[in-house]
Image (tube, helix red, strand yellow):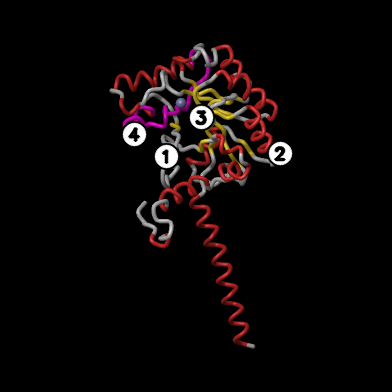
Amino acid sequence: MRLSKKTLIIIGVFFISSIILLKISLDSVYRLPILMYHSIDYTTDKKNKMMISPEVFAKQMRYLHDHGYNVIPLEKALSYIRDRKKPPAKTVAITIDDGYDDNYVYAYPILKEYHISTTIFIITDLVNKEGFMNWKQIKEMSESGIIDIESHTKSHLWLTGLNDDDLKDQLQGSKKILEEKLGKEIKYVCYPMGGFDERVKQAAREAGYRAGFATKPRRMFTMYDVYEIKRVRISPTADNPLVFAIKISGYHSFIRAFQSEHKDRPYLLWKRKRSS
Ligand SMILES: [Zn+2]
């Protein structure tokens, strides 16, 4: 009888400890999902990872809306990141890069319908060019209360390869143009093709940006540096509801990092390197 009681206590302590450890482990790899879209249009090129159809986009926005997701503006997402606080479950943020005209034609009506906050990063040199939005459309969205317009530099160059003057021009120039055209502060920059280094981050800071957004999630990034915010790419594969569910879970970056770390030695999982 005594032994049985002792055993039960041990099992109970073990069980509770396991739950606590699992919770701590999950919390440590959680990253607020900031989704990254590009073009929302029709394409016949199945290999185009940057374009999803308006139907798929509508389906995904409807899913977020119908399943009670809290789609927060970037400002709010950044406050969680700065404060190192885990947001409530089902929190996501949405960004769209490059400023294609399909954003206005297809994405904007859907975002309005579900009242979903979204940030669009604009390449100022491409405004009014074929395939891209014009200032009238950008201004209308900026004043809608739903879309936040931010900078994707002047001409979408690989920033780490630029000299200091050109880098400054790309960052400060686009900020100035957008602020003049839209009459609001431009707070964030999105690095073209995700290219950044410490010099680019410093230049973004000096240009007056409060945060810098990258593209591809690297290995286990800290996510606390607001000048290298990683995002989750939504490509056509996310048409699969399971893939989309993983991408908005907050654990996608961890799964990706784990996959890439083990891709060459799938049978040696226990020998995982501890370097970070
Ligand atoms: Zn881009």
Kindly indicate the quadrant of the structure image that contains residue 95: top right
The residue range painted magenta reads: 179-204
Q: Nearer the viewer, mark 4 or mark 3?
A: 3
Quadrant where the N terminus lies?
Answer: bottom right
Q: Give the label on residue 225, or none.
A: 1
The picture places residue 105, in percent across and down from the top left corner, at 62, 19
The residue pinned by badge 2 equals 66
Q: Which residue is more in the foreground, 35 or 240?
A: 240
The residue pinned by badge 3 equals 48
Residue drawn where x is 61% and y is 78% of the image: 8
The picture places residue 64, in percent across and down from the top left corner, at 66, 38
Residue contact between numbered discs 4 and 3, judged by CB atoms under 8 Å: no
Residue contact between numbered discs 3 and 1, judged by CB atoms under 8 Å: no
Q: Nearer the viewer, mark 3 or mark 1?
A: 3
Q: Earlier in the sequence, mark 2 or mark 3?
A: 3
> Is ligand 1 closer than 8 angstroms to the Cβ of mark 1?
no
Residue drawn where x is 58% and y is 75% of the image: 11
The picture places residue 209, in percent across and down from the top left corner, at 43, 27
The residue pinned by badge 4 equals 197
